[in-house]
Amino acid sequence: MTSNNYNSSLFESISNDIVDKGYSIQPYALPENLAMLLMQHITELSKEKFKRAGIGRAKEHAINDFVRMDEISWITSNSEANSAWIKWAASLQIFLNRRLFLGLFSFESHFSHYTKGDFYKKHKDAFKGEENRVLSVVVYLNESWSHSDGGELIIYDNQLLASSVTDNKIVTVMPSFGTIVVFLSEEFPHEVLPAKRDRYSIAGWFRLNNSSVNKIDPPS
Ligand code: OGA
Ligand code: MN
């Protein structure tokens, strides 16, 4: 699969940021036709398709209101929008593997829906030696988001995690339509502040192939 020119300069910029800082914020950068398709699709997804989010992959749905309150729906290629998204992620994966030799092997992603008051407390998407999520990608599907709508993503500095005195925020991101956030999964704790209106995002993870580590890697 090849990425078109538009994506090439975007992917180039993401790639450079990952090398320089370990994360990349790209405001309004998702190709507009893709963002529109996804937004239409997510608003049509029935309420039943969203499930209360559990903490931890492959665990029993340990629903934990203290940590996260959003609802999620895993993405498979069962619609034009989802297929276009998966294709876009695959082209990013190919680009990053060529450029950074990351060895990204697979991709998993879900829609998230935060209703008024929902949040996701500070967490990491992967822990060294435990999971094989390497790179996190989040995109936002909310039109005309403003500061008073809350729901910002805050990314923290991993180094200072232990400190309770210093403010170790690196960056605050508004969940505005088409904004893309990419970061190294093991390096950056992050949180979602309470949203004051419906907030839609996609969270995805590029993973390494675990088979070479200690076991054949089924999608558990
Ligand atoms: C996640 C996550 C961030 C967001 O689902 O793990 O951190 O802004 N989402 O929706
Ligand atoms: Mn996360």
Image (cartoon, rainbow, N blue to C red):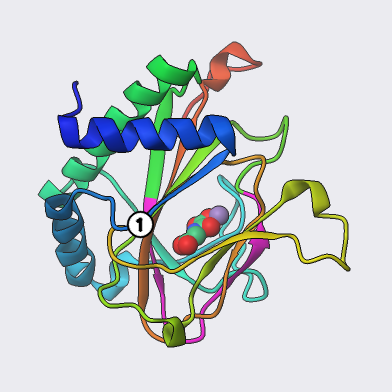
> Is residue 7 among what the camera can see?
yes
What secondary structure characterizes most of the magenta part? strand
Q: Locate residue 3, reporting x and y percent.
A: 20, 27
In this image, 89 relative to 172: left or right?
left
| Label 1: element kind | loop
> Is residue 183 among what the camera can see?
no
Please determine whether, in this image, residue 196 is positioned above or below residue 218.
below
Q: Locate residue 146, reporting x and y percent.
A: 38, 81
> Given the image, on which type of amino acid does mark 1 rest?
Pro
Q: Locate residue 98, reporting x and y percent.
A: 39, 15
Residue under the image location 62 percent in, 76 percent down: 65
Please determine whether, in this image, residue 79 is positioned above or below residue 175.
above
Magenta stretch contains residue 114: yes
Q: Locate residue 164, reporting x and y percent.
A: 87, 66
Rendered image quadrant of residue 119:
bottom right
Rendered image quadrant of residue 45:
bottom left
Q: Which quadrant is the N terminus positioned in?
A: top left
Q: Nearer the viewer, residue 18 or 142?
A: 18
- Outermost residue on the top side: it is 212
Residue under the image location 46 percent in, 24 percent down: 104
Magenta stretch contains residue 48: no
Residue under the image location 34 percent in, 23 percent down: 95
In this image, 75 relative to 175: left or right?
left
Q: Badge 1: few (under 14), some or many (20 or more) residues near its Cα, within 10 Å?
A: some
Residue under pointer 1: 27
Rendered image quadrant of residue 39:
bottom left
Q: Which residues are magenta?
A: 110-124
